[in-house]
Image (spheres, grey):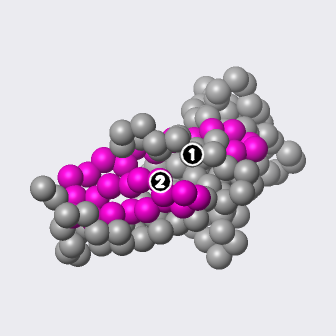
């Protein structure tokens, strides 16, 4: 028989409902729904009244790291479904004017460094809009928003050029401040 010890407790904020199905936690809030799969042999998560308890069966550096990671993930999910997240990226060009547009689940960058073929970045479960020289990414899942921002930066990456001279591209300007959570 495994002896589980409660290690960390996280209060469930008002207006958020939570459902635990095995190792998957589904969180619903006013902005939408997000889920995470927390699977480990020595660490488990369960609901107790209006809070979530993270418990361990074996205590060491490895499990303590998992506890902190899961605590942070749950905090981010709670913040995302109740308040949402917002990233701001800047379109920067000095040589050729770029045309940036959103088409379905893709961001198209045309005339990048005078190229004829558009560069395409995939958008993953978030809302992307272009306003002037800014690209705004909004959503409830910080992972998906980070993937989208990375896809956009990767689409405008310049190989074999001096980055100090050719500073054209789309770069992350403002992200999520952890102190605001």
Q: Which quarter of the figure is the C terminus placed in?
A: bottom right
Question: Which percent across, then down, holds residue 36?
Answer: 46, 45
Residue 56 vertical position relative to residue 102 in the rendered view, above or below:
below
From this view, report whether residue 91 is shown above or below residue 72.
above
Q: Nearer the viewer, residue 106 or 36?
A: 36
Dividing the picture into quadrants, the one containing residue 173 is: bottom right
The N terminus lies in which quarter of the figure? bottom left
The residue tagged 2 is 47
- Residue 153 percent across, percent down from the top left: 57, 49
Secondary structure, mark 2, is strand
Q: Residue at x 42, y 37 (%)?
A: 21
Stretch of the chain drawn in magenta: 29-57
Residue 102 appears in view: yes
State if disc 1 and disc 2 touch (CB < 8 Å): yes
As for residue 56 lying within the magenta part, the answer is: yes
Which class describes the residues within 10 Å of circle 2: few (<14), some (14-19), or many (20+)?
some
- Residue most toward the right? 132
Does residue 136 show up magenta in the picture?
A: no
| Local SS, label 1 | strand
Q: What number is the disc on residue 48?
A: none
Q: Nearer the viewer, residue 166 or 61?
A: 61
Say which of 147 and 24 sits in front: 24
Q: Which of the marked residues, 2 or 1, is nearer the chain's N terminus?
A: 1
Residue occupying the point 87% across, 47% down: 132
Q: Which residue is mark 1?
A: 18
Q: Residue at x 64, y 29 (%)?
A: 106
């Amino acid at each position: 028989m495994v002896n589980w010890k409660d290690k960390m407790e996280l209060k469930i904020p008002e207006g958020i409902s939570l459902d635990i199905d095995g190792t998957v936690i589904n969180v619903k809030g006013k902005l939408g729904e997000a889920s995470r799969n927390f699977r480990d042999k020595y660490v488990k998560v369960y609901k107790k009244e209006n809070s979530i308890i993270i418990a361990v069966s074996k205590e060491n550096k490895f499990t303590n790291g998992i506890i902190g990671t899961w605590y942070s993930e749950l905090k981010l999910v709670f913040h995302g479904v109740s308040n949402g997240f917002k990233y701001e990226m800047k379109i920067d060009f000095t040589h050729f004017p770029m045309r940036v547009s959103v088409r379905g689940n893709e961001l198209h960058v045309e005339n990048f460094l005078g190229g004829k073929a558009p560069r395409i970045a995939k958008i993953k479960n978030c809302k992307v809009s272009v306003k002037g020289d800014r690209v705004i990414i909004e959503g409830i899942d910080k992972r998906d928003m980070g993937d989208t921002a990375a896809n956009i930066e990767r689409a405008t990456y310049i190989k074999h050029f001096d980055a100090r001279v050719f500073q054209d591209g789309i770069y992350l300007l403002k992200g999520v401040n952890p102190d605001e959570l």
